[in-house]
Amino acid sequence: MNDTHWTEAAETATETATATKNARIEREDRKLEKRLCREVGRAIADYNMIEAGDRIMVCLSGGKDSYGLLDILMKLQQRAPVNFELIAVNLDQKQPGFPDHILPDYLGKLGIKFHIETQDTYSIVKKVIPEGKTMCSLCSRLRRGILYRVAKELGCTKIALGHHRDDILQTFFLNMFFGAKLKGMPAKLVSDNGEFMVIRPLAYVPEKDLIRWAQVREFPIIPCTLCGSQENLQRKQVGNMLREWEKKFPGRIESMLGALQNVVPSHLMDRELHPFQTLRTTGVADENGDLVFDEEELPMPPALPAEQIISLTPAH
Ligand code: SF4
């Protein structure tokens, strides 16, 4: 074999390895697309989020989550058992440096109905909130009012938001840690003005899948730091805590999301939810009743390292 043969053999080997790698990535991406459609479809069905004739305003911020939401809803729209309409809406809040051509260009190419609402809430917030204080609460209040008005003008029945599974759990822990409340972020709710149904079709979708999907689809992401607001440190810390847990105890996040769907009010302490004050014995055995003195057997996750197995039984 001369030098040329060696070079050709090396090139062929490299090409084969690259082709194999590309095929593997394509396979993974197809699986991801299927998973995203399945999880969004499951949430829509579980919470009856979309009905025939709905006109849904999809709020698009330019971040990975809202791009992913619109993308998956458009895919599902083609195969859904009912007809519904999607209208993408972006609120341009006139933050400095906001690239206002990106979303119209993207949406124009998609061929979907869309509306860009331009309202300079940035200047209002800057004027009202003292330097260094967090602007988010006023900013989001203004945004909410504008979006309700736009939804009404567009004749929308529902408003779809891009919050995902990890947002929901972060909110749950933030409310517990800092607000002393057992309260998450519902997958479906009636807006505070009573006029719209707000839906979160990504409620079952892990954030990591949306990160990857944004890369696969090459969404033209608009950075979310343009307003100059300080990062919500508490949310960041809770996000890190959840990621750490998931790393140490795979499946914990799914289990926690399951817990939010499986609430036992009689075993919490909210006197509004359960009539503790007026509780009476029945004298009748209940095979599903609470075995007061027994420790509840909890399934352990498979193959945990010994040092990570913690006691799940109450202390005596
Ligand atoms: S991060 Fe900026 S744009 Fe978002 S709510 Fe806060 S102030 Fe408004």
Image (cartoon, rainbow, N blue to C red):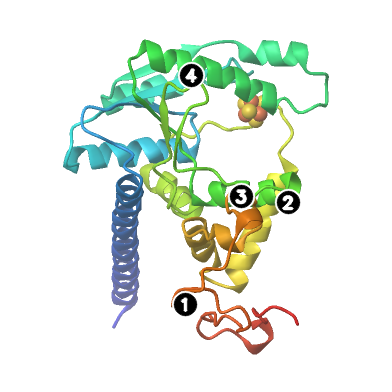
| Location of the N terminus (image quadrant) | bottom left
**Residue placed under numbered mark 2 in the picture:** 177
Point out the tag, 4 or 2, that comes first from the N-terminus.
Answer: 4
**Residue placed under numbered mark 1 in the picture:** 285
**Residue placed under numbered mark 4 in the picture:** 147
Residue type, numbered disc 4: Leu
Residue type, numbered disc 2: Phe
Real-space CA distance between mark 4 and mark 1, rounded to the nearest whole angstrom: 53 Å
Real-space CA distance between mark 4 and mark 2, rounded to the nearest whole angstrom: 30 Å
| Location of the C terminus (image quadrant) | bottom right
**Which residue is located at x 61 percent, y 83 percent?**
295
Q: SS of the residue at dot 1?
A: loop
Foreground residue among 34 and 283: 283
Point out the tag, 2 or 3, that comes first from the N-terminus.
Answer: 3
Q: Nearer the viewer, mark 4 or mark 1?
A: 1
Q: SS of the residue at dot 4?
A: helix
